[in-house]
């Protein structure tokens, strides 16, 4: 009896040990297994034609500016324009009292008439003396004197004509006209004011507002980079460089301008050069001195590469990295250099090439060397808000 009890106890102990061993194996199975690859969204990079642009700030200025000044002195008797209005070239703006200048013209005309009469008498006398000297009826000296008197009379006519011309010019200057077409500002004088030809204050200023100049500045660093890219063939430029203008309130100006020239002198204080654009202004929306921002098309990159902005991770040193998925669906961290934004993308300068797959969503779930399950969203079908 006692032997049977001992045998049953031993059998129960063995069975209990086997059960514990089986439980231990089942509990250890999840620890020994591997997690499935993380699902990520990737974009396959492709080359395309990219328009390289620069965003520069500047100010507007009138294409032509003319200060209206008197060229003769006198009393202003009329002002014949409305301040702030449009005037045409040659339009009468001020009238200076012409009385004294009219008198000067009349005197010059009389002097010219007297000189012509004297010349006629001297000429006839010289002609008669030329016949008499041939017949030896008069001396050679008498003829020389008559001929000299005639030539002096001719010179007197020329002098009188010049004096008359000058008098007429001064008389015309009493009518102060617009030198250019444009918008005229406020008048600095009124009727009854005395003006002089040498005064420093302009009577008014006319500015031509259509088209307008937009002067912007570009750093010499940017300029050198642009020239290097053009020289290497990375960029190609057209003869006409378009310019888009953004107003102070952030709205886009409806008219597109064109780049006119780049200055050849570098500002020593700022290390920049001035670029000038010509912008149409038919509605006079732009005024001189306005602050604007411009987008200038510097050139076209035929085989440019774009990477989505959300794929970039900024490093502590200011650089940029992306996660690239290789052919074995493993992740590689890659340093890249980008230059400027194009919508939701960055222009790639180095570090990536066409055909590579870049992670754009799910970055927080992966690290370099990890295997992933990529989902290509090159067509833009990435889920909104997914990372």
Image (tube, rainbow, N blue to C red):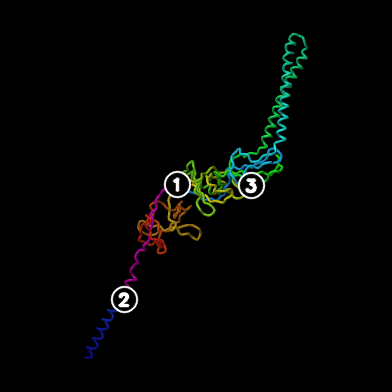
Image point (50%, 53%), residue name: 251
Identify residue for label 1. 301
Q: Residues within 10 Å of mark 1 (few under 14, many from 20)?
A: many
Q: Position of residue 116 (x, y in %)?
A: 71, 22
Residue 205 horizontal/vertical position (percent): 63, 44
Question: How many residues crowd mark 3 within 10 Å: few (<14), some (14–19), many (20+)?
Answer: few
91 part of magenta stretch:
no
Residue 80 appears in which quarter of the rendering?
Answer: top right
- How far is disc 3 from disc 2 in space, using C-alphas? 99 Å
Location of residue 63 by image quarter: top right
Which image quarter holds the C terminus? bottom left
Which is closer to the viewer, label 3 or label 2?
A: 3
Image depth: mark 3 or mark 1 in front: 3
Q: Nearer the viewer, residue 21 or 280?
A: 280
Return the x and y of residue 130 as percentages of the image width and height: 73, 13
- Residue under the point 69% across and 28% down: 162
Say which residue label 3 marks: 186
258 left or right, relative to 97: left
Q: Secondary structure at mark 1?
A: strand
């Amino acid at each position: 009896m006692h032997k049977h009890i001992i045998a049953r106890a031993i059998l129960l102990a063995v069975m209990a040990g086997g059960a514990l061993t089986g439980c231990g194996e089942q509990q250890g199975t999840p620890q020994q297994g591997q997690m499935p690859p993380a699902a990520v969204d990737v974009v396959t990079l492709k080359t395309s034609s990219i328009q390289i642009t620069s965003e520069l700030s500047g100010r507007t200025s009138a294409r032509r500016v003319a200060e209206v000044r008197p060229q003769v002195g006198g009393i202003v008797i009329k002002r014949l324009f409305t301040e702030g209005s449009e005037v045409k070239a040659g339009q009468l703006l001020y009238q200076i009292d012409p009385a004294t200048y009219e008198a000067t013209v009349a005197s010059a005309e009389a002097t010219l008439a007297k000189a012509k009469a004297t010349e006629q008498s001297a000429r006839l006398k010289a002609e008669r003396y030329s016949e008499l000297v041939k017949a030896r009826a008069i001396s050679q000296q008498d003829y020389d004197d008559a001929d000299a008197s005639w030539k002096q009379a001719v010179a007197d006519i020329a002098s009188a004509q010049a004096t008359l011309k000058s008098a007429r010019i001064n008389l015309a200057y009493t009518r102060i006209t617009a030198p250019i077409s444009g918008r005229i500002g406020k008048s600095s004088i009124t009727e009854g004011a005395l003006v002089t030809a040498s005064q420093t204050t302009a009577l008014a200023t006319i500015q031509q507002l259509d088209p307008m100049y937009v002067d912007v500045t570009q750093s010499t660093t940017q300029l050198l980079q642009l020239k290097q890219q053009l020289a290497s063939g990375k960029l190609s430029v057209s003869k006409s460089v378009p310019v888009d203008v953004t107003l102070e309130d952030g709205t886009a100006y409806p008219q597109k301008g064109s780049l006119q020239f780049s200055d050849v002198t570098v500002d020593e204080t700022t290390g920049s050069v001035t670029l000038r654009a010509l912008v149409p202004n038919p509605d006079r929306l732009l005024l001189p001195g306005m602050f604007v921002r411009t987008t200038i098309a510097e050139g076209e990159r035929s085989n440019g590469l774009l990477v989505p902005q959300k794929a970039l991770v900024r490093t502590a040193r200011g650089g940029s990295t992306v996660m690239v998925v290789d052919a074995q669906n493993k992740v590689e961290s890659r340093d890249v250099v980008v230059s400027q934004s194009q919508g939701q993308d960055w222009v790639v300068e180095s570090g990536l090439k066409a055909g590579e797959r870049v992670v754009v969503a799910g970055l927080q779930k992966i690290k370099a060397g990890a295997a992933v399950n990529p989902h290509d969203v090159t067509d833009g079908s990435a889920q909104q808000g997914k990372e």
